[in-house]
Image: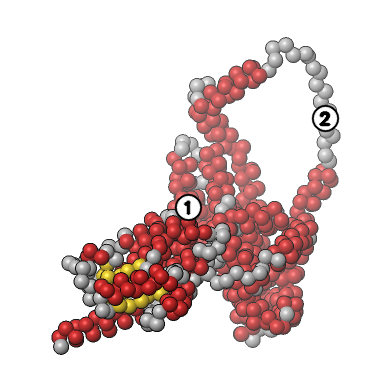
């Protein structure tokens, strides 16, 4: 049985170059954020709009009119959302003074004539301030310089700057989106040329996966967020919260922000309900509405609509959101899921960037044999037993032994000569493996027919325990305790290390003395070579072959006894 880990190759020399390249890319993305952020947004919107453009083209609509129709629909949806937000915000600003008495009454009720929690905190702050303030302080004269009031023109200019910047970004994004959609084939071919014609299959696969997965995610995200905003707006309207359409539209927009968007969308209607309604019933009902809608959206609607995930772990998405927010600001925070998914797809298709899939992707970080071996090295018999039990329940005991136990034995034998590994760690891992295998429940009936003898050492005993478990699972009565098999019908010698010749000869002579039917099982290549150098006896190197040989040998014994 070969070890699960392939031999190490000299790849460490490439890491300084990779780190330098990654640092340069990050610096370029940050310094060129004014260009790259709209470009990335345009590419993602292009991926989202591509199915609609293709659908129109399949119905004989030319490319340019199809792109214009999609852009008009997008602008109509965006304009409707902005219109709802502006009109509702202006209405709210006009109505807020009406609720001053309600808000004042609630604050007074909380303070309860100077004995409430707010007033208590204020008194504590004042007392602490008196303690920290020196008793004798020199009088100081404070001169306040009043700022000149801004005129109407200055105010309009300041508002214009605030409005022009996002409008310009949106215009550039839509213009880039339109050009990419119109010149889609030309852009695709240029990307393929830049990636290299000799790696065209990788680039094509990455582009296809990104278009399918990211495009579907973006469309489904719009649908899910729309359902969230509609449910929240309808629920708030039924509860009587003022300007419910505004909070529904705000919930739709904020939910594009990972992790923080949904809680932020609750903050505003909660404050409005507190300030505009009598009592606490409406506030609590708003909170309950959010909990129900958010749980239903997150754990029911999203899994149903998304089908497959974006392939990103929650921790990686959280870190990536913080990274893109620092790089590109609010736009980066909104684009974080899709951008991270593109990086994961890139890591899956480009071998040099495979670390991106390991760091960000939701694929299993360690294969089952590696996790099992790591638990043995950590002397965690409980964790290793749990992994073995899971694989045995999923694949069966025989497959679990072949895929977890035997590769671990081979890996221990391979790592043992290493200076960093050493015999002590090998013995500890082997004993942990033996305890895991001995803990598997078996039902021995009377004396055993097969005696399994380890040649020498802890690793051989672990391999012998694996052989006993495999034989027991096949329906044979096997043991490693000689007292439980005083007259064995068969003896199986087990070795997993390169034992000295005298030990092999002594073990073989002892086995042949106990039974005429003797078999040799070499759990590793090193053990097999040692047997071949010092004995001409046939051996078996895999558990399935051993089970077959044992079955044949027992049948031969039965036929000889019958004769």
Upstream in sequence: badge 2 or badge 1 = 2
Seen from this angle, which residue lies furthest left? 562
Dot 1 falls on a residue whose secondary structure is helix
Q: CA distance from mark 2 to mark 1?
A: 47 Å
Q: Residue at x 45, y 45 (%)?
A: 285
The image's mark for residue 235 is 1
Determine whether the residue tagged by mark 2 lies in a helix, strand or loop. loop
The mark lying in front, picked from 2 and 1, is: 2
Q: Is residue 503 left or right of residue 242?
A: left
In the picture of the structure, the residue carrying the numbered disc 2 is 146
Q: Is residue 63 visible?
A: no
Rendered image quadrant of residue 142 = top right
Image position, residue 352 (x, y; %):
66, 71
Looking at the picture, tell me which residue is in the foreground, 404 or 31.
Answer: 404
* Furthest residue in direction top, as rendered: 136
Q: Residue at x 58, y 34 (%)?
A: 100
């Amino acid at each position: 049985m070969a070890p699960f880990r392939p031999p190490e190759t000299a790849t460490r020399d490439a890491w300084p170059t990779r780190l330098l390249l990654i640092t340069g890319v990050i610096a370029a993305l940050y310094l060129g954020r004014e260009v790259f952020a709209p470009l990335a947004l345009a590419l993602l919107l292009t991926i989202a709009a591509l199915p609609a453009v293709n659908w129109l083209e399949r119905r004989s609509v030319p490319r340019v009119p199809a792109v214009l129709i999609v852009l008009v629909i997008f602008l109509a949806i965006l304009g409707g959302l902005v219109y709802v937000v502006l009109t509702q915000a202006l209405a709210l600003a006009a109505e807020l003074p009406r609720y001053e008495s309600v808000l004042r009454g609630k604050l007074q009720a909380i303070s309860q004539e100077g004995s409430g929690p707010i007033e208590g905190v204020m008194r504590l702050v004042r007392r602490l301030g008196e303690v920290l303030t020196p008793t004798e302080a020199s009088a100081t004269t404070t001169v306040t310089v009043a700022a000149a009031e801004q005129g109407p023109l200055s105010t309009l200019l300041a508002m214009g700057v605030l409005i022009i910047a996002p409008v310009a970004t949106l215009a550039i994004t839509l213009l880039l989106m339109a050009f990419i959609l119109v010149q889609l084939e030309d852009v695709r071919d240029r990307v393929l040329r830049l990636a290299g014609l000799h790696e065209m299959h990788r680039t094509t696969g990455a582009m296809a996966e990104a278009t399918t997965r990211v495009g579907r995610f973006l469309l489904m995200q719009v649908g899910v967020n729309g359902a969230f905003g509609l449910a929240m707006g309808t629920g708030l309207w039924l509860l009587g919260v003022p300007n419910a359409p505004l909070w529904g539209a705000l919930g739709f927009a904020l939910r594009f922000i990972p992790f923080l968007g949904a809680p932020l969308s609750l903050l505003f209607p909660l404050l409005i309900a507190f300030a505009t309604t009598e009592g606490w019933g409406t506030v609590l009902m708003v909170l309950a509405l959010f909990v129900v809608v958010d749980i239903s959206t997150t754990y029911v609607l999203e899994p149903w609509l998304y089908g497959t995930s974006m392939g990103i772990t929650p921790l990686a998405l959280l870190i990536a959101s913080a990274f893109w927010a620092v790089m590109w600001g609010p736009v980066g925070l909104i684009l974080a899921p899709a951008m991270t998914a593109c990086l994961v797809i890139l890591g899956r298709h480009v071998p040099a960037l495979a670390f991106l899939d390991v760091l960000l992707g939701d694929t299993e970080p360690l294969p089952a044999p590696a996790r099992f071996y790591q638990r043995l090295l950590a002397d965690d018999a409980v964790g290793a037993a749990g992994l073995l039990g899971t694989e045995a329940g999923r694949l069966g005991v025989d497959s679990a032994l072949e895929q977890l136990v035997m590769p671990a034995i081979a890996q221990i034998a391979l790592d043992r000569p290493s200076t960093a590994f050493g015999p002590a760690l090998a013995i500890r891992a082997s004993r942990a493996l033996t305890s895991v295998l001995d803990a598997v429940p078996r039902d021995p009936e009377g004396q055993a027919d097969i005696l399994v003898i380890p040649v020498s050492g802890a690793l051989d005993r672990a391999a012998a325990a694996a052989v006993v478990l495999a034989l027991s699972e096949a329906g044979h009565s096997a043991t490693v305790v000689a007292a439980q098999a005083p007259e064995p019908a068969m003896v199986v010698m087990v070795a997993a290390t390169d034992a000295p010749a005298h030990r092999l000869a002594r073990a073989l002579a002892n086995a042949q003395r106990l039974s005429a039917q003797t078999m040799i099982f070499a759990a590793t290549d090193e053990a097999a070579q040692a047997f071949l150098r010092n004995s001409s006896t046939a051996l078996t190197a895999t558990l399935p072959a051993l089970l077959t040989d044992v079955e044949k040998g027992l049948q031969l014994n039965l036929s000889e006894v019958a004769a």
